[in-house]
Amino acid sequence: MSDDFSVFWRNNERASALFYGLLARAEQDAYDDDFLAQLAAYREAGGDAAHADIFAAQYLLHHGDAENAAVCAERAYRRRPVNYEVWLLLAEAYRQLDRPVDALTMYGYAYGLYLSPEIPTDLLMRGGTEGLDRLSIAAGIGTGVPTTQTRACLADHALEFQLDAFVGEYLPLTPPAGSARYWVAAYVDNAFLSDQSQLLEEVRHTGVFVDKMQRDYPFCLQKAQEVRGPLTIEVPEGAEVILPIAGTEPLQELTVTTETQPPASAYLGKWAFSQFRLTETTEITPVSDAVYAVGTPIRLGHSPARRKLVLNILIDGLAWNIARTRFPDALPNIARFFARGTIFDQHFSTSECTYPSLPVIETGRYPIHTQVFNERDSHEIPLDIKTISECMTDLGYYAAAPAGASDSLCCGALRGYDQLNVTAWKQPSAECVDRTIMQLETFDETDQFLYLHLSDVHPWNAKGLKFHPAVESHLPLSERLFEIDEHIASVRLPRLKIYQEQFWRSLRRVDRNLAQLFTYIEEHYAEEEYLVSVYSDHGNSIFSTPVNGVMDVIAENSTRALWMMRGAGVPEGRIVNELTSTADLYPTLGVLCGFPVAEDIDGNLPAVFGGKERDAVYSMSMFPGQTYKLAVRTHDHALRLETQEPVDEDGTVNFAGARVGIYPRAHELEEDYALSSEELRAFFYPRARSMVREIANNGEFWPAMRAARPEWFGGQP
């Protein structure tokens, strides 16, 4: 197929026939020597490695070898972490291996997506609190934590799911080696310490909170250890640390003593962190027996090997293809600041929305490799895939997010930060900037890596949305009033004047607020002491015209993104025309900051930083239940691909019969401009095939998964 450009994709019919033969044998429990021979033939024919490992695990479990069945199923899980068959195999293998927490996690993934199978009661009892907590996260959606609609609990030995929030406790996610877990508190600033916790206690189990208030309710996640009783904090001679501590009772009292400080009281808020500066070994003695949470000590001091500040700012949904038409008039402060830096003018996101896009930025890997694409799933990215924040923490930076979104908590894309202040939906730039300046002032004696997520510009479905007052007051009724389906997702919002005006007003507000932060940086840091990156995770559709009545979710307006950098190591006064991807921020920070970058990432170091220019950039939409779409773009042309069948829950799709065309960049999907060129096909087809090969299912389907989604697949299992 690699040298044939007459048809984009041909399935492997030999492998497919062997797959369905194995499936028929498995359904009859015919796990015999003929099954093994057919499995070997399937592997030899180039069958899907995950499918082969699933069959191998089924065979081994049937013959009572749970240990090796788990090995095979774990290999399949690495490739297909969102797969019902894999989850069932691992759930059973872990149950037999007496790993109840791991088994409940797999049961949770399956139940959260398919409401089956029934979770064994004995496993729930053996899993204890940790098992129920992991089940809660696994059964929930991949966004929204610490709030959840699926908090698992046992009532008279029966499983129930409640509305709740993880607060005043650990968030049950897997931390990196040697790292504490996140302990969840309320974010409190210049207020009474326990007010937020007492409010939470009243509303945490209600739909008012979990479905409404959680959109902008701020949580503080701090890497911490729960402590009961006295504690000694060792501070080496000559060192100083900042110690975060939170209570679990209102006005929880501790007695603090050092060699030079006589015993004195410190008062904690319930589920609220306070900071204490320690200059010598300190004894902490609680007055009561209540638990308190002690954060990882933050050691003060600068290193010449680090910058004093590395700051990443994500402006969610900023469509650079649109903003650049009024740049710098609409963004004068951003333009002024980055005039002394580098602006990437041909920058593209890998996806059309935040959920799959943000992990790409944080890992340098496309969604086909992170496998973060299904919002109804909450699996974790493997720990051996290092995130930016983990790499920066390894370098000795204090890593924190003064304001972030909770989208990527479950998957682990943000797991390297020492502290995360998150909300589920709203991250207004004014508040985010204020928090960031407070963070800079608080920890000015250490080297900081900070992450800021701004949501002002992101468009939302207009039904029930309050627009910027200046938008509402200036539009005539003919443009102020509109009809729209409340179920239309943000990535498909139509070209309405009210959305467009909201975009420009919000953009000016972001620019105005960031000006304060940029001024602070320029006044307090020398140019060689900082590195600032501003970028977006995707664009949006509100300036696009539908193609044949359908919104093109990977059009340039939806995927052409913002990326600007300034500071130490960044060329000054450059507008770069080379093609770049959101995956490229990772290797760029690796080179500029000095952390090692794995060879197998998808990100590319831009030529402006000593790397090699890309010959193409890739944007894809792999949303379950919808057709898979891919854009492969060069400076002049674009290959556009769309499958006939929808993407399955596990991210795989059948590419046989996919519609593929090559167009000039300015006329994508316009059939009058379609190009029939052997030379262009020879360039684009191998690149596009390489991109989709890992998610191509070769027409091989698992009956239970297909039967669960008849509305997607025409009712045929």
Image: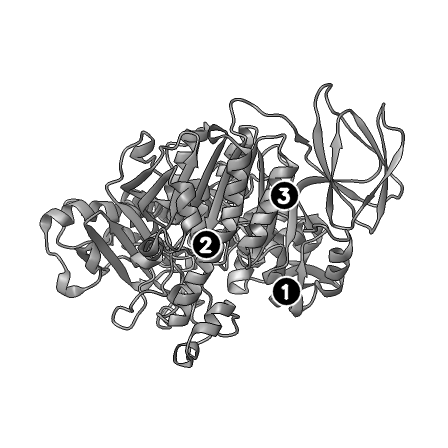
Relative vertical location of residue 674 with respect to residue 532 in this rendering, above or below: below
Q: Position of residue 202 (x, y in %)?
A: 75, 64
Quick one: quadrant of the C terminus?
bottom left
Foreground residue among 567 and 487: 567
Q: Who comes first in sequence, dot 2 or dot 3?
A: 2
Relative vertical location of residue 600 with respect to residue 43 in this rendering, above or below: above
Is residue 82 at least partly visible in the picture?
no
In the visual, does 282 lie left or right of 649? Answer: right
Task: Tell me which residue sits at (33%, 65%) in the image.
Answer: 543
Foreground residue among 341 and 42: 341
Relative vertical location of residue 100 with respect to residue 643 in this rendering, above or below: above
Residue where numbered disc 3 is placed:
438
Relative vertical location of residue 404 with respect to residue 501 in this rendering, above or below: above
Judging from the image, what secondary structure is the residue with disc 1 in?
Answer: helix
| Mark toward the viewer: 2 or 3 | 3
Q: Who comes first in sequence, dot 1 or dot 2?
A: 1
Distance from the alpha carbon under mark 1 to that under mark 2: 21 Å
Residue where numbered disc 1 is placed:
213
Residue 316 image label: 2
Q: Amino acid at mark 3?
A: Met
